[in-house]
Amino acid sequence: NAKERPLSDPLIVHVTDELDALNLWCASSDHINSSVNQPAGRESRNSIESQALRVLVKTFFPGPLTIVARARQDVPQIIMANTGYVACRSPSHPVARALIATAGVPIAAPSANKFGHVSPTLASHVLDDLGLEDVWVVDPSLGNDVDTQAQDSVCQVGVESTVAKIEMNSDDRGSITILRHGAISSQSIRDSLDRAALSQYFDVADSVKFTSEKTHNVAPGQTVKHYSPNVPCFMVSSSRQGSQPRPDLSDEERTVLSKSVIIDCGRRLSQYQECALAYRDLSSDCEPEMAAANIFETLRWSETVSGAERVFVPDMQLDPNESEEHALTLAVKDKLTRAASAVVVENFK
């Protein structure tokens, strides 16, 4: 196909109506007429899971959260990579919502780029990847049928949605696992369950994986090489980061840097700026929203730098408290890690 996506990588089903989402999942479709406020005392595992699904949908849809849960039997296996779990989210962008409404059915679709390449945040990015394929590209900047906000902005968050998988491990105990970092934090999910008196039934934890393309995953964005520019990309070890005015570099390293692009975050690699062919910082203050908004456009920019042979990004070591407070910081770290295929280098070579 145009995207060259392997069948081991599942699709996300996109909806505008909460009921369309709930009807996809086994637990919630069985209890489609139950109330989200129903007491959770002595309920079956399906009922507890259904209530949690309803809470998450009511709290975070539309928005940057993808929910993964056991699918109804009639959901096609081809969109689930034969895992039996279906991913669903409700986009907030008016163009996406208008497209789904016009289709009249939920739309199962991936991001509009070549598989493994940097995600698109502009219509021009889609044309760069798929312009020679038999596809139509919707560009809100060319028309007058959408609101001004849609025309003037790139993607509101800048990175893909948080992916959370929900499942019951016993009759009265379940887990909600963060499979991909995005704007919605695990703490936000805990808070929503707590407000609905459901937190006693669920453990919420991160379980981000780095898999091969052959692994059948329940959610996209799990492969170790993802969001990668078309130039070899590497992470620079934390031992080589800092702000020394005169970096300790060998002649070979200086030669390599003279043909390399540095994509920084929080000035971790700023000492090498003068030696590099080109340099950009996603956010010199490491402000999560700004870094997330800039990351994909900057990765694509690195491919356009004439003479660039390598791209170097920082291996971001995060304080646990900082990570929990800023979900987008985790997302930026994850995108940079996958862009470099998780390869960390101690030397510029």
Image (tube, rainbow, N blue to C red):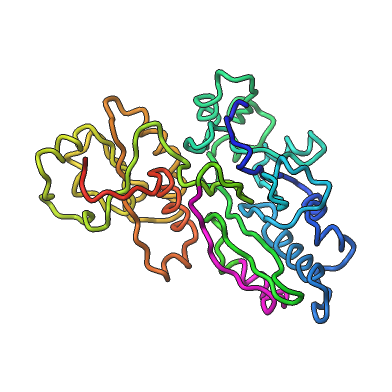
Across and down, in percent, residue 2 comes to 60, 26
Highlighted range, magenta: 189-211
Q: Is residue 13 above or below residue 187?
A: above
Indicate the quadrant where residue 286 lies. bottom left
Residue depicted at x 31% and y 41%: 280
Residue 198 lies in the magenta stretch: yes
Across and down, in percent, residue 223 comes to 51, 46
Q: Is residue 39 above or below residue 58?
A: below
Residue depicted at x 19% and y 45%: 272
Residue depicted at x 53% and y 64%: 206
Across and down, in percent, residue 346 comes to 23, 51
Residue 95 lies in the magenta stretch: no
Q: Which quarter shows the N terminus?
A: top right
- From the viewer's perspective, is 56 left or right of 304? right
Residue in front for this viewpoint, 121 or 285: 121
Q: Is residue 318 above or below residue 254?
A: below
- From the viewer's perspective, is 334 left or right of 102? left
Q: Residue furthest front?
A: 214
